[in-house]
Image (spheres, helix red, strand yellow):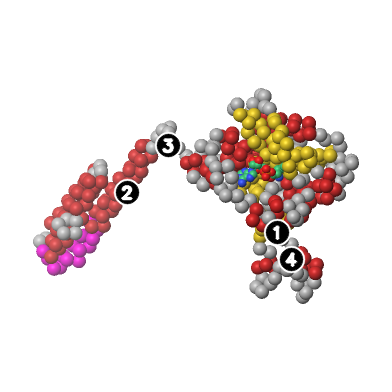
Amino acid sequence: MALADFVADLDALADAAQQAFASVADAAALEEARVEYTGAKAGKLKAAQQGLGKVDKADKPAAGKKFNEVKTAVEAALEAAQQRLAGSAKTQAREAFDPTLPGRPFRLGHLHPVTQTIADMKDIMGRLGFTAVEGPEIEDEWHNFEALNIPAIHPARDPLDNFYLATATTLAPGSSNRGPSPAKGPAAAAREEKPLLLRSQTSTVQIRVMESTPPPVRIISLGRVYRPDTADATHYPMFHQIEGLLIDRGVTMADLKSVLRLFCQSYFGKDEVHIRFRPSFFPFTEPSVEVDMNWQGGWMEMGGAGMVDPNVLRAVGYDPEEVTGFAFGLGVERVCMRQHGITDIRALYENDVRFLSQF
Ligand code: FA5
């Protein structure tokens, strides 16, 4: 075959291939053109390469060079077509996206209902002039019992009714809890062996505040407390209490009732709320009462309250002849449950998002 014919055929092939690639409009047409011109088995380039064998021997170097040029040009036209189609696919996708359409709803989390109740309670009591203070959840017997006028023989101190913690000494191998360790000296051993427990009530915070602050005192404390109660619809071994304490000159039960009434009125958003006191007993208040609030035609128990016992005032260095005060302690879960119509306290702690997302 003459070199001129071979070159003419290659030029025609290059023109046809470039035109074909430039005119394809979609991926299927591009694939068809790719197979026709550059297909490994029966493509037109492959056939042209086989034609090289028929060119005169002397013209072979020039023919080979020409073939390589055409092959590069055809492959470049193929790549350009591939990029053009990929670019237009992206543009189409962009155009197909309509930002004004409503998308899938974005799920936002929110505070747990008990945390919401705590925040609301802090808010209301803050407006009544009560400062929120924190206290430790691991307590000693002085703050949980003794300073609250609960002596060692009191049944409330029964180890079966409290979560006592194993102390460093009781955990140490071969150690005994019966007496001070002679090697460490009595003071260090006494400190080591002081029984600790998870606080069973937030009244512990009253003592901590009064020990460190001279009267007047006007605080609330909100937090977790622990009791080995069997879980049922209204009891849980861990729950929250709000404790209130007001100490000043001339504080009376009437002040206690007014504050609780205002608190309930604000919390439940009702115009008229009635508070009922039922006689009760707490070692740290005298007199002591159970507090009920009228709710949807019935009475709802809120917690305990009373006038701080003079023994408690004396235990923290206050003079009961000078100052008096009231204290109250309410169950946070019970209030939260009443507000939302929740009938089982356990539902609050099962972490079922379908339940929690309702509040
Ligand atoms: C007390 O804990 C006293 N410290 C309250 C107090 C404070 C009285 C200051 C006087 C002065 P009581 O054990 O009754 O009291 O608990 C108070 C409230 O906590 C109860 O009315 C109830 O609402 C809630 N409560 C008690 N046990 C549980 C429990 N296991 N699960 C959920 N809530 C509970």
The residue under label 2 is which amino acid type? Gln
Residue 66 magenta: yes
**Which quadrant holds the C terminus?**
top right
Location of residue 168 in the rendering, given as x and y in whole percent from the top left corner: 69, 66
Q: Is mark 1 within 8 Å of ligand 1?
A: no
| Three-letter code for the amino acid on which mark 3 is drawn | Gly
User: Is 15 above or below relative to 301?
Assistant: below
Q: Nearer the viewer, residue 131 or 217?
A: 217
Q: Earlier in the sequence, mark 2 or mark 3?
A: 2
Q: Which type of secondary structure does the marked residue at label 3 adopt?
A: loop
Give the extent of the magenta segment: 54-70
The residue lying at 19 percent from left, 53 percent from top is: 35
What secondary structure is the stretch in magenta mostly built from? Answer: helix
Viewer-nearest of discs 2 and 3: 3
Residues under numbered marks 2 and 3 in contact, where contact means CB atoms less than 8 Å apart: no
Viewer can see residue 186 = yes
Discs 4, 1 touching: Cβ within 8 Å: no
Q: CA distance from mark 4 to mark 3?
A: 61 Å
- Residue 228 vs 300, above or below: the answer is below
Tell me the number on the disc at residue 196: 1
Residue at the spot of label 3? 103
